[in-house]
Image (cartoon, coloured by chain):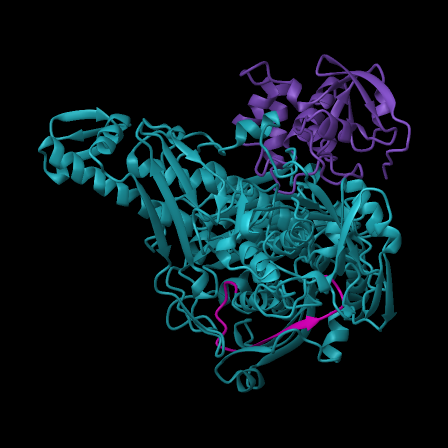
Chain colours: A cyan, B purple
């Protein structure tokens, strides 16, 4: 599957070169932030957090804590020299609570001590005087109270009400999909190092070095040029180290400012899970009108997310959810509303897919509801509603689906997964198996690529060639395991036609490439690959001009190939050319910049062309459920994912498999659970179950769609890969519903929220048996 | 909680074949001994509660979670960590198998996966891919690189 493509040069574009740190990962030599002795005099910080979900903060008693050995300082909101606000999108999201605490885990103070143990112990000794207030803990309660963190969003097309009213068939329903803890294996961590003139340097495990810079600047009252962020690698991010990492870095910086010492803040696992935000759980309520075959005429859908105590990324997550409420389907008349519900829980944030999975899951549930109501095969109803020709190619937000691969991926997936024969075999199995039932699920995928907000779709890079011909690459993206640095280095190696190992990959830093966007929205290689391409080509053009003049050759007679450069009749090594160019005073350093063209978005009308292109895919999953216990297992999964012309098939396959497994966790076993007091009870791996190797389907066929270069001029015609395949896991949820539906002869709608834990599957089976008996 | 007034105790053990004599607080875990006292940062702290496997090391050939083991209990024992596998530039064949099978993404769980797999193979239980997948489930990988991890282990174990 991951066989390397033979190439005369090592590391060519589209070859399966290994991750840049693969060797160091296997020897333990890869250095993560916590894997180094800190700078001299480094202190450690720990957080004092609210023990209640909602209350008025009346006092902080730190006398006992400050008297403990090794304790250096305590920092509260009053110590913040700048603005006490870490909001990435909105405003008024204090880093440290001032007069109120709004969730159980809300940071109130930072204790700094000589060792981490002392800091943690002292933080536990700080007494908070809080007058408790009743908390709002669920989406339903927030909706009832009209408690939101952002104005309600509304995406509308056509006369949805008339379309529904006039449709031959109508249904109403509700479905819920759960949140998800990121559970990056490396927890949140930051090191703040004060410098001269009040400067602050942050070494952080962040997907967004520029936002760390901005938020630390805001907290400390510094211009951006006084704050530098650096990150070499993350031990996993998945969206959880976007805004949440800025909070952690900001708190470390406050402690470093107050103590004038380097301060490291590392959250232990339980603190991390109690303090930081997660994927939003969503509630969808819908009314849909359709014809007798199942073709949708009109949809009115309400999406409500658990935003938590503050807005954080909830508004853009909701925007992306609304922009994926269509998934693969043409919705002629639509109203889709988004409520970002304010609750007294962690402030939910980015997580791989960023609302896209929740939006797509909702419409998949609607389509299956239609199919079972009509007694039709859900696959047939899906295909009937696909985007197509004849005007059926415009999304509810007004963008034309110009690059539709849905029919192709569906056809290839049905063939390669042997759908028809297995459908019959499963039905036969179920007919003779009273307790264990099997299910087959299908998921078509269309995912919009680009940040919804056009501004964010920019990337930068900095390339140096040294006089010996070695190359140093820096760009704005962060490496969190997804192989971004490898892909971008492949691009630069391809421009100069040199071996990949000539290129030194370096830590991302705001000092070298400024004003970057988060490594998020799957755009890492699209933006930074193009920026590095531009930088490398700027130098290459200088080298071509120089070599042509120096050797008396025409410009088009200067050719880079296999680590060499030919100029007319002269052939020299790349390193020799670099040295010669330096000697003749040619600049060998350049920045590169890229902004995605042809995108637009109007957040008021919720219309525009926010996505440069769409990524497509399809999945088939087969499950078995025990109808007496709800226990279930994924027996087989077949995935087909569009990667455009893959920059690196091995890395892309890893992304597809990993995203699917993570998505499978989201729809099956990962359940966040808060008690009546708002305490997150699933705050460690013993209570929060992520998929393990035993949960991976024993038959797991994963393919990249062949011969499908991106119609848009992206970097080497590749496509983004980080998020889209996570949605393919919705096929597992679909398969579980299919298994439950078999109890009602596939003619009774299934009520099964996600995560479809054994408990929920059991309830769904009981519910199905009851309703089937009533028919 | 550590306290400087608390009595420190002497400990002698072998790590990667090398004898170490250290004086530590009795509450120090084996993981903290490795990382904070000896600078062996290859063994990772993922959850610090014995449930993610990132800190897996071998003690007398058996795999354990170093975060749940007190260092003082390892007196006289032979501890093997990820740093002890490669011979100079030459990777251990299991490390090589991980590289060749792309059995990693972010890399944070990788040392624990490799040490756990060595323990599993030493137990004589890495007999087929399904069994490996079952018995490696205690080593979490959030990137979802499991198929390649299992393939790498199976290739090395000849399963």
Q: Is residue A585 left or right of residue A713?
A: left
Q: Is residue A426 left or right of residue A10?
A: right
Q: For the image shown, how many numbered marks are present on the structure?
A: 0
Q: Is residue A741 left or right of residue A476?
A: right
Residue A347, horizontal then vertical, whole percent:
69, 63
Residue A630 is covered by the magenta coloring: no
Q: Is residue A742 above or below residue B84?
A: below
Residue A279, horizontal then vertical, whole percent:
65, 58
Q: Is residue A72 above or below residue A560?
A: below
Residue A740 seen in render: yes
Residue A32, horizontal then vertical, whole percent:
61, 37
Q: In this orientation, which residue lies closer to the viewer: A197 or A122?
A: A197
Q: Is residue A492 left or right of residue B97?
A: left
Find the magenta span and give its range.
A327-346
Identify the residue at horizontal 61%, vertical 49% (top origin): A621
Q: In this orientation, which residue lies closer to the viewer: A599 or B97?
A: A599
| Viewport quadrant of the C terminus of chain A | bottom right
Residue B66, horizontal then vertical, whole percent:
78, 29
């Amino acid at each position: 599957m991951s066989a390397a493509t033979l190439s005369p040069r090592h590391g060519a574009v589209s070859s399966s070169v290994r991750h840049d740190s693969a060797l160091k990962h296997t020897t333990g030599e890869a250095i993560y932030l916590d894997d180094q002795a800190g700078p001299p005099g480094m202190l450690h910080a720990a957080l004092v957090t609210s023990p209640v979900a909602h209350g008025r903060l009346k006092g902080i008693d730190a006398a006992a804590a400050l008297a403990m050995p090794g304790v250096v300082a305590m920092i509260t909101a009053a110590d913040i020299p700048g603005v006490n606000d870490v909001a990435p999108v909105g405003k008024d999201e204090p880093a440290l609570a001032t007069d109120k605490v709004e969730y159980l885990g809300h940071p109130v103070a930072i204790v700094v001590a000589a060792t981490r143990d002392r800091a943690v112990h002292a933080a536990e000794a700080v007494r908070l005087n809080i007058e408790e207030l009743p908390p709002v803990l669920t989406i339903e309660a927030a909706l009832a109270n009209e408690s939101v963190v952002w104005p309600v969003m509304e995406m509308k097309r056509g006369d949805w009400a008339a379309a529904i009213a006039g449709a031959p068939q109508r249904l109403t329903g509700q479905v819920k999909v759960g949140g998800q803890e990121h559970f990056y294996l490396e927890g949140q961590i930051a090191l703040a190092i004060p410098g001269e003139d009040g400067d602050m340097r942050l070494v952080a495990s962040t997907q967004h070095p520029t936002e760390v810079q901005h938020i630390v600047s805001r907290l400390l009252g510094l211009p951006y040029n006084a704050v530098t962020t650096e990150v070499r690698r993350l031990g996993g991010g998945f969206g959880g180290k976007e805004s949440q990492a800025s909070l952690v870095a900001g708190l470390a910086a406050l402690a470093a400012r107050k103590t004038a010492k380097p301060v490291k803040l590392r959250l232990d696992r339980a603190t991390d899970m109690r303090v930081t935000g997660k994927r939003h759980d969503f509630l969808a309520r819908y009314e849909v009108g359709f014809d007798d075959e199942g073709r949708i005429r009109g949809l009115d859908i309400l999406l409500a997310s658990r935003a938590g105590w503050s807005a954080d990324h909830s508004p853009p997550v909701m925007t992306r959810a609304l922009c994926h409420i269509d998934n693969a389907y043409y919705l002629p008349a639509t109203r889709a509303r988004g409520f970002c519900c304010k609750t007294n829980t962690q402030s939910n944030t980015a997580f791989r897919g960023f609302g896209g999975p929740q939006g797509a899951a909702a419409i998949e549930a609607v389509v299956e509801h239609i199919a079972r109501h009509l007694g039709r095969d859900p696959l047939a109803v899906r295909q009937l509603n696909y985007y197509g020709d004849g005007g059926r190619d415009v999304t509810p937000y007004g963008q034309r689906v110009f690059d539709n691969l849905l029919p192709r991926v569906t056809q290839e997936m049905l063939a390669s997964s042997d759908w028809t024969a297995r459908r019959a075999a499963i039905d036969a199995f179920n007919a003779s198996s009273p307790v264990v039932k099997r299910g087959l699920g299908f998921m078509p995928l269309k995912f919009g690529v680009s940040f919804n907000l056009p501004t964010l779709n920019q990337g930068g890079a900095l390339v140096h060639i040294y006089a010996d011909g070695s190359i140093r690459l820096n760009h704005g993206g962060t490496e969190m395991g997804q192989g971004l640095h490898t892909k971008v280095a492949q691009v630069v190696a391809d421009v100069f036609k040199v071996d990949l190992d000539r290129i030194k990959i370096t830590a991302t830093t705001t000092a070298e490439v400024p004003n970057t966007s988060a490594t998020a929205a799957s755009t890492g290689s699209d933006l930074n690959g193009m920026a590095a391409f531009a930088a490398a080509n700027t130098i290459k053009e200088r080298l071509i001009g120089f070599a042509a003049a120096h050797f008396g050759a025409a410009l088009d007679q200067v050719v880079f190939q296999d680590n060499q450069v030919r100029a007319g009749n002269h052939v020299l090594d790349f390193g020799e050319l670099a040295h010669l160019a330096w000697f003749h005073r040619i600049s060998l350093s350049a920045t590169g910049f890229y902004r995605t063209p042809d995108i637009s978005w109007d957040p008021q009308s919720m219309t525009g062309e926010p996505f440069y292109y769409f990524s497509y895919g399809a999945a088939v999953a087969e499950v078995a459920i025990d109808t007496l216990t709800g226990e279930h297992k994924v027996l087989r999964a077949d995935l087909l994912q569009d990667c455009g012309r893959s920059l690196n098939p091995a890395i892309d396959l890893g992304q597809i498999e990993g995203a699917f497994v993570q998505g499978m966790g989201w729809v099956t076993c990962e359940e966040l659970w808060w008690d009546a007091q708002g305490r997150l009870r699933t705050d460690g791996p013993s209570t929060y179950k992520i998929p393990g190797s035993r949960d991976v389907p024993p038959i797991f066929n994963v393919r990249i769609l062949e011969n499908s270069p991106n119609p848009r001029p992206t970097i080497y015609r590749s496509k983004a890969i980080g998020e889209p395949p996570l949605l393919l896991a919705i096929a597992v949820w679909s398969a579980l519903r299919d298994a439950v539906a078999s109890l009602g002869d596939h003619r009774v709608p299934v009520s099964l929220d996600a995560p479809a834990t054994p408990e929920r599957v059991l309830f769904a089976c009981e519910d199905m048996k009851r309703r089937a008996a009533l028919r | 909680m550590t306290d400087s007034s608390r009595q420190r105790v002497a400990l002698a053990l072998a790590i990667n074949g090398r004898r170490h004599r250290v004086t530590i607080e009795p509450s120090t875990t084996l993981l903290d001994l490795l990382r904070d006292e000896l600078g062996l940062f290859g063994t990772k702290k993922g959850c610090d509660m014995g449930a993610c496997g990132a800190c897996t090391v071998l003690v007398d050939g058996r795999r354990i979670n170093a975060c749940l083991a007190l260092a003082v209990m390892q007196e006289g024992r032979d501890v093997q960590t990820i740093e002890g596998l490669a011979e100079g530039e030459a990777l251990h064949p299991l490390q090589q198998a991980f590289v060749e099978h792309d059995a990693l993404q972010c890399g944070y769980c990788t040392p624990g996966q490799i040490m756990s797999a060595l323990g599993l193979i030493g137990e004589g239980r890495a007999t087929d891919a399904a069994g490996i997948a079952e018995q490696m489930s205690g080593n979490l990988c959030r990137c979802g690189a499991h198929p390649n991890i299992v393939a790498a282990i199976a290739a090395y174990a000849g399963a």
